[in-house]
Amino acid sequence: MSTTRRLWIALGLLLGTTFAVLLWMGREIHRLAPPLPERVVATSGQVLFTRAELEEGRQVWQSFGGQQLGSVWGHGALVAPDWSADWLHRESTELLDMWARRDYAAAYKDLGEPEKASLKARLQAEMRGNSFDAKTDTITVSNDRALAISNVAAHYVSLFSNDPATQTLREGYAMRNDTVPDLKHRQELAGFFFWTSWAAATDRPGGTISYTSNWPYEPLVGNSPTPGSFMWTVFSVLFMIAGIGLLAWHYAVWHSKEPHLAPPAKDPLAGITVTPSMRATAKYFWVVLALVLVQVLLGAITAHYQVEGQQFYGFDISQILPYSLTRSWHTELAVLWIATAWLATGLYIAPAVSGHEPKFQRLGVNVLWTCLLIIVVGAFAGQWFAVMQKLGLANNFWFGHQGWEYVDLGRFWQLFLFVGLLLWLGLVGRALWPALRRKDEMSSIVGLLFLSTVAIALFYGAGLMWSEHTHISMVEYWRWWVVHLWVEGFFEVFAVAVISFLFVKLGLVRGKTATINVLFATIVFMAGGVLGTFHHLYFAGTTVGVIALGASFSALEVVPLALIGMEAYETWSHGRATPWMARYRWPIMFFLAVSFWNLVGAGLFGFLINTPLALYYMQGLNLTPLHGHTALFGVYGMLGLGLMLFCLRGMKPDVHWNEGWLRGSFWALNIGLSLMALLTLLPLGVLQLSAVLENGYWYARSAEFMTQPIVHLLIWMRVPGDTIFAIGMLLFTWFVARLWIKPRRLAEPHASGGALPVHAAMAPRED
């Protein structure tokens, strides 16, 4: 049996086993999710909330942005509190002060330590005791707690209105006035926040750990890391070390056997004919650049909200473009423009791989592009009406804002996008079909490329697995199928297959070698990637089994990144293998940047927050976007830009490339991203972490902490990095535009996709 066949069998067994476990654990998450009661009542018989009110409260939360304004159970935006942690602390202090005044005629903060300890023990018994009765489907709370709940609910009713009493707090939270104009909706919203807090502090039946594994850290109620978090953190580190050792051994053994491959004298891609459908993908790249420029602008506005609250340099824009809306569009555009770049690459590469242009392929490419524009405009318009509370709860789920970070699109637009992805799958598949039928050294790479295409199209469907009233724990489960498996998983397999194919076609890597490397890399990545999904779900109403699997397998995601320097060296070597490779210098430079940010953003900053113990304290702090920004743009964004340049090189073979624009863009993007991370996100995240450890999670997300001068200074320090980054993106856009606007033709035209003459490739670079 050949090595390639063994690797395919191993990959099949791996995916079958890991997805079976992933689905089985999904069943367990559903079975053991925190109960949503029919009623919440006081011992006096007073009904505080009904299930209908709790569910409608969640709908209200979703309608104004959900996870895009504050967070729940740690998932969501960084500005405004984590509402579950904020409610928990407010209710706890309300009870402590109530008892202190009743028993000692003084405020809790003025009591001596013995009195404080006594009341704190009483509070923990009150808050952690599980009073849910499954027979009556009812949560019962004491009359004292009912009064505290009423007082805290009044705070949120005021906060989400235009009450002048909470105006300063709204500005600190970057909330627009009248975020929820309807009084009944504000009361129901408060009920939803109560329930998320109740699940965070209440012990599971027969246990001493809350439904959210004692998250958030709140010393008042006894929320602290569980023994399982400590234990699986240790095992996570051990698994990572063992995995790195095994991978290093494999690399040393395998690569020592590989003989040197002499590169061809001429560019092998010179013979590729650019078909009409391949040329039609140009408009996708134009859309990519438009989307990324809008995303950069929205990112600047979103970041500025942290210092001026409701204004942008003196202009009150919160009543037109609220923070939750600019952040929604900023995060969605990141995924949309990167995905568009990769989808366009698939449409461009497929006919190049097979040498076949199916009938009506160009029409299909144009129809899909039109659908993309309709989806972006329609979905974003619906979200504006939803956040401005003009759409109504009845229409919000289908046409407005779902409130789940990265998958905020209304269900109608999600379905439309899913249909578009299926159309993309059909277009790529029919173009690849002749290559799939061939049996040669490239067949496995082409097969993996096609399978990743299938996975990209189908796995977005995981975002359709929840309904409007699905339990929040199950929504989180399916949401991370999209964010983790779709974006971080199968897109990466697709990219590895595309790049490997390009290097093989360029004659820089043997087909058999590339096939084995791609299959092995896919096995290593997916070994940690599939069950590593659970590391996003440690505290989402799940059990210790999720922590164990997430910690163990997500550690393996870091393993391939340990040898990223060797991968970078190989990429760099390919770029210098022969003079004609100078044509591909800048695509390869962007691939080098991918390797760097894979190590730093995905590896170092990712593992920083990856283990259960670390994430317990860091979830929802600025250390999370430190990983998010450097990994999402640094890896997937840079990869998208590099693939775009590869396609443009073939699409415009006879046009002069002004390398000065590209050089400036490349370094500005990388320097800007580095400054953003090192001057703001990292130091601010460390300050927040210190605040969590000293005062509890609620404090690090409070207006009291986030409005400190040092915090504002660190946010202002984003300006240099953001400015340099924006300049880099403008330079890249201008470079691409000049390929069509008054382009300079080369003195010696070449065949489509062909190489420059050797003397031209070796000529000094022109700035």
Image (spheres, grey):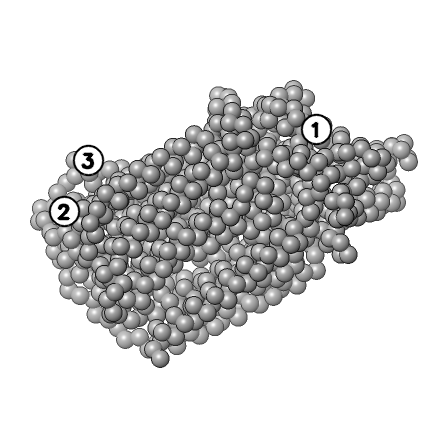
Q: Is residue 545 left or right of residue 634?
A: right
Q: Residue flagged by tag 1: what amino acid is it? A: His
Q: Earlier in the sequence, mark 2 or mark 3?
A: 2
Q: Quadrant of residue 114?
A: top right
- State whether residue 298 appears in this view: no
Q: Quadrant of the C terminus?
A: top left
Q: Residue flagged by tag 2: what amino acid is it? A: Asp
| Viewer-side label of 3, 1 | 1
295 shown above or below 628: above
Q: Residue furthest left?
A: 748
Return the mark for residue 654: 2
State the residue in front, 647 or 471.
471
Residue 431 x, y percent position in the rendering: 25, 54
State the residue in front, 183 or 575.
183
Residue 130 x, y percent position in the rendering: 77, 48
Q: Are marks 1 and 2 in contact (CB under 8 Å)?
A: no
Q: Secondary structure at mark 3?
A: loop
Q: Earlier in the sequence, mark 1 or mark 2?
A: 1
Residue at 43% of width from left, 33% of height from top? 380
Residue under circle 1?
Answer: 155
Residue at 54% of width from left, 31% of height from top? 394
Return the mark for residue 741: 3
Q: Secondary structure at mark 1?
A: helix
Q: Residue flagged by tag 3: what amino acid is it? A: Ile
Q: Residue furthest top?
A: 164
Residue at 65% of width from left, 56% of height from top? 543
Q: Are marks 2 and 3 in contact (CB under 8 Å)?
A: no
Residue 710 x, y percent position in the rendering: 58, 36
Q: Work out how far the residue at label 2 is from the one at label 3, CA to CA, in angstroms.
A: 14 Å
